[in-house]
Amino acid sequence: MMLWSLLLAVLCGTAVALFDPMLEQHWQMWKKTHNKNYQTEVEELGRREVWERNLQLISLHNLEASMDMHTYDLGMNHMGDMTQEEISQSFASLRVPTDLKRDAVSFQVILPLFVYCKASSLFSVISLFHFVRKSSA
């Protein structure tokens, strides 16, 4: 048991060293903003790794968008610590109620993710990131 605890401590210390220390404040702010609390330090380290990877993807995409390689920008949202598979699974479990009436009514839906396409002026639901319409200048 003592050996297991020591090994876990060493692995956690090694994992922390792999993270970008410049992002620590941003990680803490993101967790506070989205009310993220993890049950164990190991879980938090794993979520931090996913979050940093997603942040890198967002930064690269937005750099490309600034060079007109994309028509939209990406931004971090509440699902930034989730993998693509986890997000897909969470949406796959959503079910439409069988007694849902199909009458035309006014309602509001808060979608966690969306993309604006300039060419078609349509919004489409996508996964992992939320998109921000680029200003046409």
Image: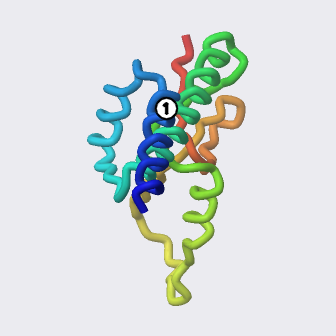
- Secondary structure under tag 1 reads strand
* Residue 85: image location, x then y, percent: 65, 56
State the residue in front, 79 or 132.
79
Quadrant of the snapshot with the N terminus: bottom left
Quadrant of the snapshot with the C terminus: top right
Task: Say which residue appears at 46% left-offset and 49% top-offset.
Answer: 8
Task: Say which residue appears at 37% left-offset and 33% top-offset.
Answer: 27
Task: Say which residue appears at 38% left-offset and 49% top-offset.
Answer: 41
Task: Say which residue appears at 65% left-offset and 34% top-offset.
Answer: 117
Q: How is the image coloured?
A: rainbow
- Residue 132 makes an appearance in the image: no
Judge whether 55 appears above or below 9 on screen: above
State the residue in front, 35 or 43.
43
Q: Is residue 60 left or right of residue 104?
A: right
Q: Is residue 22 left or right of residue 134?
A: left
* Residue 76: image location, x then y, percent: 47, 35
**How many tags in the picture?**
1
Judge whether 62 appears above or below 2 on screen: above
Q: Amino acid at mark 1?
A: Gly
Q: Which residue is mark 1?
A: 75
